[in-house]
Image (tube, helix red, strand yellow):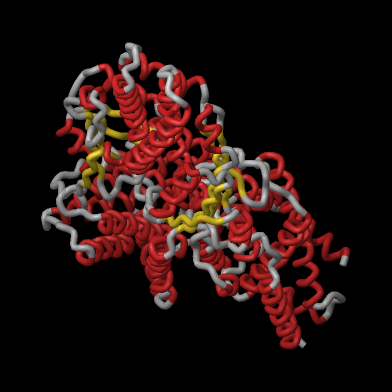
Amino acid sequence: MYFLKLVTLFTTNNFVQLRRKWLSLPLLLLFPIVLMGLIVFIIVHFFSNLEDEPLQIGLVDLNQSTETEMIVSLLEESSQLGDFVQMNRMTENEATQDIAHDELAAYILFPEKFTTKLYNGQSVVVTVVGNPKRPTESYFIKELVDSAARHISSSQANILTINHYTKQLELDSETRNEIMLEQFNEFLLYAIGKDSILDQNLRTNNASSSPKQYFGLAAGFFILTIWIVTIHHILFKESSSSIQRRMTLYGVTGLQQTIARLIVTFLITLFLGVLLFIGIIKILNFDFNSDNYWRLTCLIVLYNLGFLLLLAVIDTIIKSYKVRLLVQIFLTIVTLFASGALIPEIYFPLYIQDYLSFLFSYQAYNWLEEILLNGRLYVDFIPLLITTVSGFLFLLGISSIKERVQS
Amino acid sequence: MTNILYTRLLLWKKKWLSMLIWLVLPIVGTYFIITITDSLQEDSKVPIGLVIEEQTDIALQLLNSIQESELVRVIKTTEEDALYRLEKHELDSVYIIHEGFEEAILNGKRNKLLSSYRTDLSFAYSPVKEMIVSLVQEDTGRSKAAHYIIQLNEHYQGENSWTWEDISEKSIEIQQDENLLYTAFHYNDSAESPTETSLISWNTWGLWAILSVISTLFLSDWIIREKALAVSTRFSFIKPSHFTYFAFTICIYMALFFLFDIASLTIFSIVLQEKVTIYFLVSLLSFRIMLTLLAFSLAHSFKSSGMYYGMAIVITLIAATISGVVLPVNGFMLKGPWTEIINPLDAFLNERMTVLWLLISMILVLLILTRKERSNA
């Protein structure tokens, strides 16, 4: 009974403490939303920039033969290497200068004797020279050229095969050269038209959901998590050791304070979290069954509890305030990563995927996806419930050990 | 001066472990983030669904070569199941090898041999598609060449009896014997090619800079504690003035930080093969001075350390976002002279000397210290 009384005392105290911060609190709560906005702004800016100003790539032809001429003009005119790419013919000097002025993302260099070597079966090196200021773009272009080179090299094997057999046909060299040029042409076009192999179809993910909703849900999950950490952090007050000693005389334990903090943070973030998700559902027009509201609420309850218990365990184990903060930030990042909100879990290595299903953030986010994006009317609460209960028992155990060590 | 240094060392001795953790955080953190993402990237594969409608040699060969690729993890299934799982985003994309695949290849046909399905969330679609297309293209191209040669033989009434199999074998042989077309990659400013380019390649010094921001801010909390001490009224009675005390302590901290900066420089150049130049050393030094002074100015405006730590985290997150270290958008990112004005890290991240923010931070610190002194007098 006395235990509960003290917990209520600290709980009300925490509420009072929060009320005193009514001015800075909304600002702090706004922060994750602003951060998300900033990230969205940067990403949108990045893609629209890419559309407005396609990547500039130079083509430098040191060979100047009919064949390379053909390749260069084909590349220049078509957007075969992708929609975001614009290619221009230039000399090597121009290309180097443009890279130095940051006007070019990379240039592709066709070496001297490119064609002759190609026909004779000697190895040829096509060089991609990247702009050191733009590593990501250069990498992207290198990939494109690699894939083009794969096609050309298989075409080249075919051309050489034709060359090999035509030699046996006893034709005069002029006719043979003509045939070779013609076939070179043919296979180049053939390589470029590679996409006709595929009949490409675009599917939509489940009935209503769009990427906007998908990312909206992820952003909501992020914001909720940051809110929990923030409010948990605000409520912590470092009391000096003399006060702590005096409090122990009254039978106050660390556990009571931890639980009080947990209750207050939980109530506030639950309220805010439900509001946030309802807001997201309304703004992004989710096709949301009203039966699912209580499932959504239960999921937020369990996720909040699970995450808060994790933070509380860290609070109990680590004494140094700063190190504790560091560990908590680190675990927050791990929690977010493991949820699959940042990178969908299917892209993780298998050995990680095996363990993910035991993690509360993965379970919670997975079911949030199911009811919000896939419109399911069922949630399996048991695993989450087990995690939460065991987390609570763990917290009790840890703090009783800690209490005993101190006394 | 020696007194100040001596007392500082005494203070440090009491909490050396916590300090050490924060001081090595940028080095250890950067190293771990880079190695962990590298190994994760190596091990992760894109799950794709593959539906085979006919069990012919060529189709099974294609399946094998797709399975051998390091890029994907193939899940063989039925069309219905594959599309269902695609919609649930359990698969990145789905490819269907249609009935009559072998026949079409043997006849030198190419159009629509395969169907692919993707969604808006198929993040890895284009590299996987490229890979599969190039594998199929090898087969169809070979077939095309064989048909052409047989046709040529007939046209010139050659007496050779070449078969489709012979020719395509020859073509495979040529391709394997002579790896013919290479691509090379290097940056404009250096002749050697980078050891490994990968999709998520962290900017080592960018990560380090972000972690340095948080560690410097957290280690600067002594300012909050010491300016609130009851003894601060006694500055009027002791020899070092308020100004010299704080200025000198900042210098001590700066030296300590820089010591660990040099350590990170050494470690990164050995372990992660980062280049070290004199100019870089200078830009590192200017970055360090700026960071320490800014951290001082920030810490000085806080009364409670709890709020200060919170602010430190907020600032670090914003810095990480706008400087393009975490989002893989460097190069594309907001350009222009004003990025240097809003982002103190910008100059360092672009391997330039921090000048503008160094001046700003110096002025800030001077203002704070001199104002305090006047009010004390």
Question: Is residue B40 visible to us here?
Answer: yes
Residue A111 in the image, given as x and y percentages of width and height = 58, 42
Q: In this view, does B268 lie above or below A296?
A: above
Residue at 73%, 57% (x, y): give it: B280
Residue at 20%, 49% (x, y): give it: A204
- The answer to which of B311 and B42 lies nearer the viewer is B42
Question: Is residue A360 visible to us here?
Answer: no
Tell me the quarter of the image containing the C terminus of chain A: top right
- The answer to which of A400 and B330 lies nearer the viewer is B330
Q: How many marks?
A: 0
Q: In this view, does B7 lie above or below A177?
A: below
Residue B225 in the image, given as x and y percentages of width and height = 66, 68
- The answer to which of B47 and A225 lies nearer the viewer is B47
- The answer to which of A197 and B27 lies nearer the viewer is A197
Q: Is residue B368 above or below residue B174?
A: below
Residue B235 in the image, given as x and y percentages of width and height = 79, 78
Residue B32 falls in image quadrant: top right
Residue A91 in the image, given as x and y percentages of width and height = 59, 55
Residue at 26%, 26% (x, y): give it: B105
Residue A157 falls in image quadrant: top left
Q: Is residue A161 above or below residue B377?
A: above
